[in-house]
Image: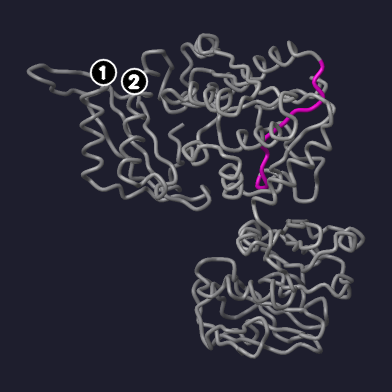
């Protein structure tokens, strides 16, 4: 892999699918990075991009305040693919016309293609694509030809092959566009001449070398949560500088059953990392005593985490670098191309600037979550940790409704462990994107043996999602739910009822608090 010689730039015009475009490019083993439409021509020239993809956007290109980049970009000789708003921007900038459509196109649409186009080489004459537009290209610029149409859209795509400029009104990046990946591959390989040799093994090797050169003989600390992002980041640094890295694992006692021990065993014993485990359960429970309001719980836990981390960091003396598990979506959401406003401390709860670090080490800042998992497997992290379920920073505190006690924690840990174990045994652990138990603040009447009970209700939650922005409740087979319910009732004390949450997001959130 040589990122500098084979990088695609995804120029963001504010489209909802920007990150998805980047993911699709990387799935083709071509490295890419997202940049703002404000990126200067000078920076683009220096970066030696193999190609540029313009994203969609919600604006009308003919409006004065709509996002526009420097038109010189079309004269650089770099192939450009415009998608949706990006296509309209290309047409408008080069002398074509963009108009408001009488009939809008949204959703699955049949498109007729000119398969002589290099962009549509090997595709069907007609195929379903995903449309999402109000405006349309009503006149193509000089030198362009129309390469596809729909019954109501006269320019579903256009190109100027001699200048390597291509534009599509539809969204090839979404799965609803049946042959969308083929259009993107044609652009990447047939137009841009990419080789597709960006591999995770190369990323790991090169990143370790870069970290070794950057850190030298200085010290690094990392707040290790046991989550995949912080774990992979820490292990990359450890592979680079060994014992110069110290990981601080703040165990607030709100982790899942046995999770603290598992994290310690993996990183201390398997990888021989310098790890400080701070058992702060009692400290956190004292702070949380009597607190029921979810946001108060979050703030208390976040604040206390910072205080514990600060105390332990100061014991180490002078430490030059802080390692964080920041990943690419964090960077993009914090402001594309505006590194100064990135949430540089978000992974450790908002550490204050005055701790005195020389710099921040973020080895994963150019990777998406699925790529982080691949890196973790390359590094030898056990699969069960790499595929660890998403887990909120406040931990089980926001899966216990009402106030938090040691007794409630043990009830929830046991119930949650049973649910996760049965889902894994059923082979559903990769199909269901997130699943967990909630200890509700509800008690109900029950009958156990010959006696009446008045005990706790456990709610089970399972969702399927691609982006966690929206989610559907998982259709777990009844026999599995029945087994989970039976085991919880029989094995967990003080529980006499189990319910399953069948609410999607929206209107509900994935977590209960």
Q: Quadrant of residue 231?
A: top right
User: In the image, is residue 310 above or below residue 151?
Assistant: above
Residue stretch in magenta: 318-329
Q: Which mark is residue 411?
A: 2
| Marks 2 and 1 in Cβ contact (< 8 Å) | yes
Q: Is residue 487 above or below residue 451?
A: below
Color theme of the render: one colour
Q: Is residue 465 left or right of residue 416?
A: right
Q: Position of residue 437 (x, y in %)?
A: 36, 32
Q: Nearer the viewer, residue 242 or 159?
A: 242
In the displayed structure, 411 sits above or below 129; it is above
Residue nearer the viewer, 32 or 38: 32
Q: To which residue does mark 1 refer?
A: 493
The dot on residue 47 is none
Q: Alpha-carbon neighbours of circle 2 within 10 Å: few (<14), some, or many (≥20)?
A: many
Q: Callout 1: helix, strand or loop?
A: loop
Q: Is residue 467 above or below residue 236?
A: below
SS for callout 2: helix
Image coords of residue 296 (percent x, y): 55, 22
Snapshot quadrant of residue 323? top right
């Amino acid at each position: 892999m040589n990122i500098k010689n084979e990088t695609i730039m995804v120029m963001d015009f504010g489209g909802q699918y920007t990150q998805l475009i980047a993911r699709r490019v990387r799935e083709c083993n071509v490295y890419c990075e997202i940049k703002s439409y404000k990126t200067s021509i000078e920076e683009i020239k220096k970066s030696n991009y193999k190609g540029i993809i313009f994203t969609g956007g919600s604006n009308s290109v003919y409006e004065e305040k709509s996002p526009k980049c420097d038109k010189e970009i079309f004269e650089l000789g770099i192939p450009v693919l415009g998608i949706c708003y990006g296509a309209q921007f290309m047409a408008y900038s080069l002398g074509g016309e963009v108009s408001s459509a009488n009939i809008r196109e949204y959703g699955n649409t049949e498109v007729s293609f000119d398969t002589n186009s290099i962009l549509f080489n090997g595709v069907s004459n007609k195929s379903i694509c995903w449309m999402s537009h109000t405006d349309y290209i009503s006149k193509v610029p000089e030198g362009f030809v129309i390469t596809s149409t729909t019954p109501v859209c006269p320019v579903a795509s256009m190109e100027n092959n001699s200048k390597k400029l291509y534009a599509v009104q539809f969204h090839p990046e979404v799965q609803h566009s049946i042959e969308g990946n083929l259009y993107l591959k044609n652009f990447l390989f047939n137009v841009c001449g990419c080789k597709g040799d960006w591999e995770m093994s190369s990323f790991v090797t090169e990143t370790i070398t870069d970290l070794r050169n950057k850190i030298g003989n200085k010290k690094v600390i990392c707040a290790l949560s046991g989550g995949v992002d912080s774990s992979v980041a820490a292990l990359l640094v450890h592979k680079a500088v060994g014992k110069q890295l110290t990981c601080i694992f703040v165990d607030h006692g709100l982790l899942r059953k046995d999770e603290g021990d598992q994290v310690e065993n993996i990183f201390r014993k398997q990888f021989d990392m310098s790890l400080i485990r701070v058992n702060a359960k009692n400290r956190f429970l004292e702070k949380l005593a009597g607190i029921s309001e979810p946001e108060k719980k979050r703030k208390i836990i976040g604040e206390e985490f910072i205080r514990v981390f600060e105390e332990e960091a100061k014991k180490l003396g002078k430490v030059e670098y802080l390692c964080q598990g920041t990943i690419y979506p964090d960077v993009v959401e914090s402001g594309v191309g505006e590194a100064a406003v990135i949430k540089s401390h978000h992974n450790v709860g908002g550490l204050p600037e005055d701790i005195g670090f020389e710099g921040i080490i973020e080895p994963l800042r150019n990777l998406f979550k699925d790529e982080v998992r691949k890196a973790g497997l390359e590094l030898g992290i056990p699969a069960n940790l790499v595929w660890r379920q998403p887990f909120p920073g406040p931990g089980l505190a926001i899966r216990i409704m009402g106030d938090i006690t040691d007794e409630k924690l043990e009830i929830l840990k046991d119930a949650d462990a049973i649910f996760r174990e049965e889902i894994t045994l059923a082979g559903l652990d990769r199909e269901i994107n997130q699943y967990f138990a909630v200890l509700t603040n509800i008690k109900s009447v029950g009958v156990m043996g010959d006696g009446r009970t008045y005990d706790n209700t456990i709610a089970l939650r399972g969702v399927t999602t691609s982006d966690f922005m929206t989610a559907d409740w998982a259709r777990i087979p009844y026999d599995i739910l029945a087994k989970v319910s039976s085991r919880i009732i029989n094995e967990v004390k003080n529980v006499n009822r189990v319910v399953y949450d069948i609410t999607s997001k929206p209107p509900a959130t994935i977590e209960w608090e």
